[in-house]
Image: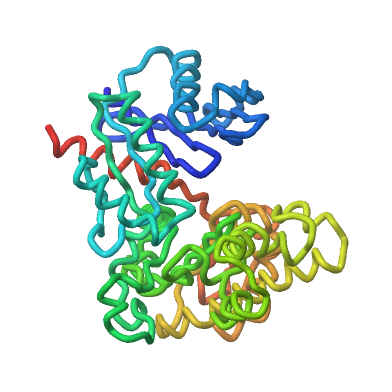
Amino acid sequence: MKHILTLNSGSSSIKFALFEGQAELVERIRGQIEGLGAHDPHLTAEQGGHKVVDEHVDAAKAADHEVALSLVLALLDKTIGRTAIEAVGHRVVHGGIEFSESIVLDSTNIEKLAKLIPLAPLHQPHNLAGVHAAHKAFPDALQVACFDTAFHRSHPWVNDAYALPRQFYDEGIRRYGFHGLSYEYIIEHMKQIAPLYEQGRVVVMHLGNGASMCAIRDGQSVGSSMGFTALDGLPMGTRCGQLDPGVVLYLLQEKGMTAEQITDLLYKQSGLKGLSGLSQDMRELEAAGTREAAQAIDYFVFRIRRELGSMAAILSGLDAVVFCGGIGEHAWRVREHVCQGFEWLGIELDDIRNQAGETVISSDRSRVRVFVINTNEEMMIARHTARLLAASH
């Protein structure tokens, strides 16, 4: 029985999941440690859909990724017993130009990924910190990198380039797209539940604290709302989304802001949080009842609708729409407002199905089928890791 651990290491968190199996992978447990390096880190885990751990931990035990990983190991020992981990699959945000599929991590590949840190400065260093921590914890396990950018390397050139001098494209300044592991899982799942639609023209909306959309034809990404970084496209929890680059120049030249201040503004103080002045949590915004919260939601919906129209144009039509991610899967009012008025495009919701969060929420008359699918990036990482583990023997 193979055991595969997946790690998604962020700046202040580690999300983890343990899978076992041979031909078919089964999730045994998943969880996360939040607040690494903070005074009050928090460990949660669930097994079979039931929460088995929800506790605050000593800050010294979650000071960084390496010591926090020891908490994960202790939790696994406690809940399912001592388990030999044959492989560890890591979510790595940026694969750059070179990596268009998951890879086995060796010292050469790790060095190459470290050189991509300038392309994803708020993600890549922490992804690699998780890799180094896992190497120490599991020196004999196969370490695998699974990239958020890989799914989008099928982009046509016109949706890959910026209208800058060609030398910048050759140097790697191009539209990479992100959330690829989520999109790949959704398409694989659609092969099982709706194979005719999976082969058609599909727009998938990954709506959560990070949010993006992807135009997919015949199972291949042909357009993404995110570009060079995970800052572009839709407004997100704390990220601004699409922004005239002249705004950045203005902030630099007229406001005298530093690059670090602008980075903090665009990544951590904007989006739903900045517009509402309250929170990045959609549940809090829907319950707030303030004008600013309502406007933040309206702007979020407006940008999704604008992007949906653009992606329908890229695809020359539309056969299916998929909502996924925390907001996409749970905020039925957002789904309703996104789809309202799109009858001309062939979208018609069934209100009862939508409010119940059924898998298919479009009406029987709708020419475009609308789905709600729970995405599972950890399962996608585990599948890639299992494939490379099998190939290594």
* Front in this rendered view, residue 154 or 267: 267
Residue 32 in view here: yes
| Screen quadrant of the N terminus | top left
The answer to whether residue 325 is above or below residue 32 is below
* Front in this rendered view, residue 357 or 393: 393
| Screen quadrant of the C terminus | top left
Percent of width and height locating residue 378: 42, 42
The answer to whether residue 318 is above or below residue 64 is below
Percent of width and height locating residue 232: 51, 70
Q: Is residue 204 left or right of residue 60?
A: left
Q: Quadrant of residue 229?
A: bottom left
Residue 361 in view here: no
Q: Quadrant of residue 133?
A: top left
Q: Is residue 170 left or right of residue 286?
A: left
Residue visible at 21% across and 41% down in the picture: 107
Count of residue discs? 0
Residue visible at 34% across and 76% down in the picture: 160
Residue visible at 61% across and 59% down in the picture: 264
Percent of width and height locating residue 63: 54, 29
Percent of width and height locating residue 234: 57, 69
